[in-house]
Amino acid sequence: MSGDEKHEWAAASTLDVLWVLYDKVLNVTPATADDPDRDRFLLSKGHGPMAYYAVLAEKGFIDESTLDDWTSWDSPLGQHPDRVLVRGAEISSGSLGHGLPIAVGTAIGQRIAGSRGRTFVLVGDGELDEGSNHEAIAVAARLEVANLTTIVIDNQSAMYGWPGGIARRFAVEGWQTAEIDGRDHEAVFAALTAPHDRPYAVVAKIERSY
Amino acid sequence: MTTMRQAFVETVNDEIAADPRIAVVTAVISSNEFPQANERVVDVGIREQTMVGVASGLALAGLRPVVHSYAPFLVERPYEQIKLDIGHQDVGAVFVSIGASYDDPAWGRTHQSPGDVALFDTLPGWTVHVPGHPDEVTPLLRQALKEDNRVYVRLSLHENAQAHPVGEGFTTIRHGKRGVVLAVGPMLDRVVKAVESENADVTVLYAATVRPFDSDGLRKAVRDTDHADVMLVEPYLEGTSSHLVSETLQQIPHRVRSTGVKRHAELRNYGTAEDHDAAHDLDVVGLGSAVRSFFRG
């Protein structure tokens, strides 16, 4: 894959977390992609989806051969994922600040249905600039959406940073939080499988490599 | 007397009790009208972007969300969420607004939404209902709640004296030969009075559903007149449906006069809805003048 140099860093930032999620954490396979009891993963940070597509291909959701001509006219794979075109993609994303509010809804929907399924949503630290996220962070805590996990990829992209740290922004609203090295697979796995009885935010720090 | 809003609340509360798919998402406004103890009733506080996002998530999880607020806060503020969280995700929802173009003009421009239907018109796949009477609200809503599509229901404090059949395309109220007047929702009674006051020999059609647009109904009505002249009377931004009238009649020479909330200037006056109707020539006097000038000769 090539052709998205602008977002290569975004893709490189998410790859390790995405791999651990799909390899060890999420209860979803191509065969259960429509099962109401599946875990749902929402890629809110739709920029730089190359890592996402690669993981979906490795896990059999999409055909690996589709990776080569991505963004071409007939390709289902664009610079931002489209759930209608990509098997396994729970949401279409690209415009920032949409995934977390939607995730609050899917998690509430799972709860209403009595489903065992959980909702995971991945956002970027830059994406947290969007105010809609902060609406959702507050609502998820007030409505006690305990089956929701938000993973924040902190690659230091936020224009003005987050004084006191990103985890604090969630914690002050009542979220359980964890901070980890987003490259350390064992730490990612441990954090994403930790029990929680409140909405849960895992801040995965990625050191800038340039 | 039951208002459109009361009809909406009663219908939705009946359906919540009867259908486990139905959910309601609000942002404070009207939230106390719905059973708060029901887990399918979600009030997100004054957070309209999240209101639509949560509705999207509920729909993705298999529920049928009803999303409700005052028109500008339901449609204009979270417009991108409507476009992406509902439309682009390819999920359905029933959006129900109150406030209309200027139901409460004493609250000023912030609480006016004449552009709501025009905004929905930029998005594919939306059904748009503009009922003109409380008794039209319940059948439109019940049908919407049964389906999985994207529906906008625009409620208003203004209404006609009697209900008309809904869901079957445009309804013919009277026949004439000089042309056709298409009256949308609460505009009907004023249109009929204006036409009668001018002794205009025109057909009057009534629409409580404007999307999809009943092109066949309009084409047939025009065919039965001597002139392909169509006056469109909408209670929101003028000309919102004029492109569909033109598309419907593209094979024949025709004239279109669009009336509605004027686009040319932002009114900063308060007053009453009737004052605003007069300012936009949407009262009987203004509509009569439009009928007289357009259908002259």
Image (cartoon, rainbow, N blue to C red):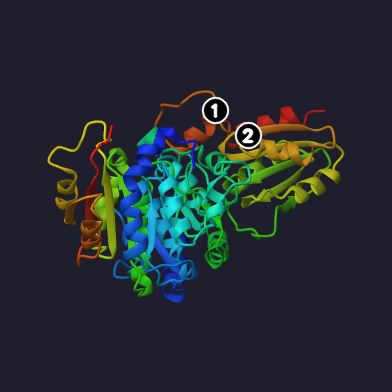
Residue B276, percent from left and from top: 49, 33
- Eyeballing the image, is A117 above or below B224? below
Give the image quarter of residue A116: bottom left
The structure residue drawn at horizontal position 49% and vertical position 57%, both measured from the top left corner, is B94
> Residue B236 occupies which quadrant of the picture?
top right
The one of B250 and B5 positioned closer to us in this rendering: B250
Identify the secondary structure beneath mark 1. Answer: loop
Residue B201 lies, in percent from the top left, at 79, 40
Nearest the camera: A131 or A87?
A: A87
Real-space Cα separation, disc 1 to disc 2, in angstroms = 9 Å
Q: Amino acid at mark 2?
A: Gly
Residue identified by numbered label 1: B263
Viewer-proximal residue, A66 or A134?
Answer: A66
> Residue B267, percent across and down?
45, 27
Horizontally, residue B50 falls left or right of residue A70, namely left
Q: Amino acid at mark 1?
A: Arg
